[in-house]
Image (cartoon, helix red, strand yellow):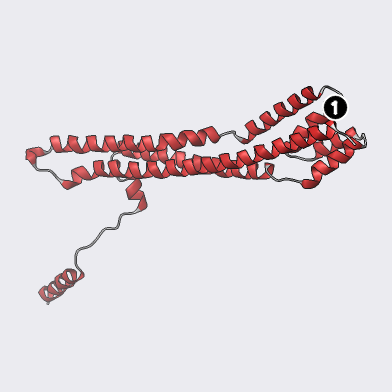
Amino acid sequence: MNDTVDTLQTVNEIAKGPVVKELSIWEMLFGGEIAGTIIMAILFVLFVLTIYIFFERYFIIKKASKVDTNFMNTIRDFVYDGKIESGLDLCKSTNSPEARMIEKGLTRIGRPLEDISQAIENTAKLEVYQLEKRLNTMATIAGAAPMLGFLGTVVGVIIVFFNITHASGGNINPQDLAGGLFTAMGTTAVGLIVGITAYIGYNYLVSKVDNTVYQLQASAVNFLDVINKPV
């Protein structure tokens, strides 16, 4: 009876065919040698940092790029009416790069136009600097991540050749090569993914900053026109 049961189990296992092991994301990322695992961990940290910087900068730049069409019209009316203090109060109550730039210009009214223009320009540069904070980090990650991935490839290939060279009796066990191949292929793929993500995110944010700079320049020109040719 037991022989019959064992035979049926064997037949069922044969009918099911060979068991195919699915590769999990965790095994793909950290299934290689220890050197590859270290590189993967670094790439993972860089990816998280990229995502954090992107969304943190995105919301700040988006807020800074909002244009209030009534703001400059109100400032123009205050200047024409000689209500400089009211204009300053409006700028202080408005949290935007444009308002801080115009506020600096209002405090210089009465001085030569060149001095006012220079003060506005310096303030605009400081505002742009604040918007561009951490973008250099994203640019660095965009270049460094693929190179880290290629470093993992080199390390993986070295491990493979080392295992082949030291194989006992010339018999090469595929499992001895698996770790090195995991390291070689996995780090390259992940490095490229992180690098591409950082590169696209960086260029997108730079384009948003450029649009904000254009808006600041337009506001500065309008303000200078107002104080240069009052009605």
Question: Mark 1 sits on what residue?
Answer: 109
> Residue at (49%, 44%) from the top-left corner?
200
- Observer-nearest of 113 and 131: 113
Q: Is residue 73 left or right of residue 141?
A: right
Q: Quadrant of the C terminus?
A: top right
User: Image quarter for residue 73?
Assistant: top right
Q: Is residue 52 left or right of residue 228?
A: left
User: Can residue 166 be seen in this snapshot?
Assistant: no
Label 1 CA crowd tier, 10 Å (few <14, some 14–19, many 20+): some
Q: Quadrant of the N terminus?
A: bottom left
At label 1, the amino acid type is Ile
User: Image quarter for residue 135?
Assistant: top right
- Observer-nearest of 68 and 77: 77
Q: Position of residue 79 (x, y in %)?
A: 88, 35
- Observer-nearest of 48 and 94: 94
Q: Classify mark 1: helix, strand or loop.
A: loop
> Residue at (32%, 38%) from the top-left corner?
36
Q: Is residue 56 left or right of residue 228?
A: left
Q: Is residue 128 left or right of residue 74?
A: left
Q: Position of residue 13 (x, y in %)?
A: 18, 69
> Residue at (31%, 54%) from the top-left corner?
23
Q: Position of residue 63 (x, y in %)?
A: 68, 44
